[in-house]
Amino acid sequence: MLRIVNRVLIGLVGLVLLALGGSVLAVGLGAPAPSWWIHQGRHDVLLTDAERTKWQDHAWWWPTVIAALAVLVLLILWWLTNVLRRRRLTEVLVDTGDGEGALLRGRALESVLANEANELNGVAQAHARLTGTRTAPETKVQLLLEPHVDPAIALSYLTAHALTHARNSAGLEKLPTEVRVKAVRHRQERVS
């Protein structure tokens, strides 16, 4: 969901900036101003003295402007932290019993989990991704199934074999998993 919001938001901001920047450049280079443009020539200023001082005597104006800008800054910071936050877990802490532990590469565990899920007859493709923290990892698994495979059988195999092996090999008590199952697109079969 956040990926879709990011793309739409960045696309809209880009289009607005492109339209405004292009029109400012065109008017600045001497082209006639577009009909929707707020100024008429290349020597116009952005805000006249009258426009700049219009709201100066109103007591509500500056607190409203500052509050709106503060909300805008907070929204931008929230968006930026969500975009920059790492979604993929790079390592898992394995309890070795000596008090120190060992680190297991997250990509290695993801690849073993996906390969074991691919071994099931009828699984066209499997992807696994680790999320969470290094002491409490979680997995997200996507299975692409052939049309003849029962999703319940594939899910029970994944739970009984692949996830159990991953949990036991990493020495975890539990490994919460979100599984998404999709079917391979195929042609309709002819019945004669």
Image (cartoon, rainbow, N blue to C red):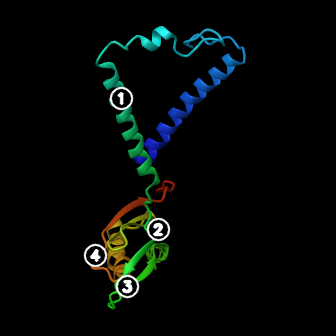
The image shows residue 79, relative to residue 132, as above or below, that is above
Q: Which amino acid, by three-letter code, is at mark 2?
A: Ala
Q: Earlier in the sequence, mark 2 or mark 3?
A: 3
At 60% from the left and 29% from the top, the residue drawn is 18
* CA neighbours of label 3 inside 10 A, class few (<14), some (14 to 19), many (20+): few
Quadrant of the rendered structure where residue 140 is? bottom left
Q: Earlier in the sequence, mark 2 or mark 4?
A: 2
Q: CA distance from mark 1 to mark 2?
A: 50 Å
Marks 2 and 4 in Cβ contact (< 8 Å): no
Q: What residue is pinned by disc 2?
A: 126
**Rendered image: mark on residue 66:** 1
Give percent across and percent down for residue 154: 37, 71
At 43% from the left and 42% from the top, the residue drawn is 5
- From the viewer's perspective, tell me whether residue 136 is left or right of residue 142: left
* CA neighbours of label 1 inside 10 A, class few (<14), some (14 to 19), many (20+): few
**Rendered image: mark on residue 174:** 4
Q: Which amino acid, by three-letter code, is at mark 3?
A: Gly
Give percent across and percent down for residue 82: 41, 51
